[in-house]
Image (cartoon, rainbow, N blue to C red):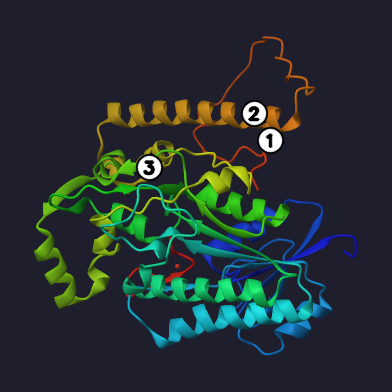
């Protein structure tokens, strides 16, 4: 253990914490500690679990005693309403974790944020760089918490210059298993759209979220990075690719309904259905050196294929989905191999093609959409007012 880097994942009982911990446990060069206020419902094999709240004042002693090298701060509770309880966990809890990390000599901290912090504004430029003002403070409760926390992150960098702080701002997260505002919006049979508005949006596949966090663990990249799949898309096309039926709604009526009933009736803040929020991902590629495996269209097609709506589609439509998924899989694996060859340099020998022999290939092998581990691909409660942990995006 002494020869291994110690990686601590807080919020390990949440969806993102668990997935990141499981992915890190595949590496032989790290020792993974999981931290949460409650033990995981299902045991995570080989995880060194410690039960503690992130606001515990003894965290600094724990970090120092365990010689923690890197913290993945993934403890986060999503709430559409402004709540003192979630503010205390999301904002004050983050401050205490970061403060303990600096005092204990932790080398690196990774924080999971969202491009929602930019706010959906009519004056937004086509591509928002990481230095753009954070105007999301007027949005849903969890977005306000992210904005507050990122403000603290800016000050923390000046107060603790020896700590590498990596902030990952993810676009709308989509995937067959995750629970996020975008997946809740697209899991309904119909998708309400504001009449006369079709903003550009970005998405990111849930596997690429995990891969980006693990990539940041393994690469020292201080700073803030927008993380999104290739290809911003108009909202109307996103709804179509997800296999949903768009329902145009007059925007004054939509805003009135939310003000009357409350934000819980709208998974996405209505402003994000009205104005564009598209992050510039050049720093992701050039400085973080991370490339998502899924394009935006591939992520949405897979979501559609896995959607409950699929069981009601005609058989030929289901087969068309499978054909497209396999085509996307082939293209994604091809891109991953090409990227690996480029990173290996000009002297790397191309992989020899195996001699053609008679093989038995299961038709399900490529349709399971398991991540390609040959590439460098390291990847909240019940929906409602308090939707759960780690679902921002």
Residue at 79% over, 75% down: 105
Please state which of the two labelled residues, at mark 1 or mark 2, is closer to the viewer.
2
Find residue 332 and report its horizontal and vertical position in percent. 53, 31
User: Is any part of residue 366 visible from this angle?
Assistant: yes
User: Is any part of residue 379 visible from this angle?
Assistant: no
Label 3 to label 2, Cα distance in Å? 24 Å
In the image, residue 364 above or below residue 143: above
Instruction: Tell me the crowding category of disc 2: few under 14, some 14 to 19, or many 20 or more residues within 10 angstroms, Cα based.
Output: some
* Closer-to-camera residue (162/89): 162
Please state which of the two labelled residues, at mark 1 or mark 3, is closer to the viewer.
3
Please state which of the two labelled residues, at mark 3 or mark 2, is closer to the viewer.
3
Question: Circle 3 sits on which residue?
Answer: 232
Instruction: Tell me the crowding category of disc 1: few under 14, some 14 to 19, or many 20 or more residues within 10 angstroms, Cα based.
Output: few
Helix, strand or loop status at disc 1: loop
Label 1 to label 3, Cα distance in Å? 27 Å
Q: Are marks 1 and 2 in contact (CB under 8 Å)?
A: yes
Find residue 69 and report its horizontal and vertical position in percent. 78, 67
Helix, strand or loop status at disc 3: loop
Residue at 60% over, 49% down: 211
* Closer-to-camera residue (276/187): 276
Question: Circle 1 sits on which residue?
Answer: 374
Residue at 59% over, 51% down: 212
Helix, strand or loop status at disc 2: helix
Question: Circle 2 sits on which residue?
Answer: 337
Left or right of 327? Residue 308 is left
Give the image quarter of residue 21: bottom right
Q: Earlier in the sequence, mark 1 or mark 2?
A: 2
Find residue 92 and report its horizontal and vertical position in percent. 54, 84
């Amino acid at each position: 253990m002494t020869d291994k880097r110690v990686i601590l994942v807080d919020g390990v009982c949440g969806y993102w914490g668990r997935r990141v911990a499981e992915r890190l446990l595949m590496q032989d060069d790290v020792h993974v500690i999981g931290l949460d206020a409650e033990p995981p419902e299902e045991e995570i094999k080989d995880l060194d679990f410690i039960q503690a709240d992130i606001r515990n004042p003894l965290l600094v002693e724990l970090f120092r005693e365990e010689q923690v090298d890197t913290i993945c701060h993934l403890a986060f509770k999503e709430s559409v309403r402004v709540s003192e309880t979630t503010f205390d966990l999301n904002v004050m809890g983050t401050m205490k974790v970061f403060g303990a990390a600096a005092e204990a000599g932790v080398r690196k901290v990774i924080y999971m944020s969202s491009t929602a912090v930019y706010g959906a504004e009519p004056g937004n430029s086509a591509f928002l760089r990481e230095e753009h003002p954070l105007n999301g403070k007027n949005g849903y409760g969890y977005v306000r918490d992210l904005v507050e926390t990122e403000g603290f992150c800016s000050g923390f960098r000046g107060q603790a210059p020896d700590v590498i702080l990596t902030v990952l701002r993810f676009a709308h997260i989509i995937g067959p298993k995750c629970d996020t505002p975008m997946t809740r919006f697209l899991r309904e049979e119909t998708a309400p759209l504001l009449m006369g508005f079709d903003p550009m949006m970005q998405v990111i596949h849930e596997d690429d979220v995990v891969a980006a966090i693990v990539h940041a663990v393994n690469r020292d990249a201080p700073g803030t990075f927008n993380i999104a799949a290739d290809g911003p898309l108009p909202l109307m096309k996103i709804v179509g690719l997800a296999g949903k039926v768009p329902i145009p709604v007059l925007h004054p009526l939509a805003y009135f309904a939310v003000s009357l009933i409350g934000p819980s009736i709208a998974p996405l803040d209505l402003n994000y259905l009205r104005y564009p929020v598209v992050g510039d991902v050049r720093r992701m590629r050039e400085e973080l050196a991370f490339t998502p495996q899924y394009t935006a269209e591939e992520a949405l097609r897979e979501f559609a294929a896995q959607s409950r709506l699929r069981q009601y589609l005609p058989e030929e439509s289901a087969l068309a989905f499978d054909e497209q998924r396999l085509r996307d899989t082939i293209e994604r694996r091809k891109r991953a191999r090409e990227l690996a060859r480029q990173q290996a340099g000009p002297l790397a020998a191309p992989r020899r093609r195996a001699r053609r022999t008679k093989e038995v290939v299961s038709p399900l092998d490529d349709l399971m959409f398991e991540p390609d581990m040959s590439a460098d691909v390291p990847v909240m409660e019940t929906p409602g007012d308090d939707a759960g942990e780690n679902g921002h995006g």
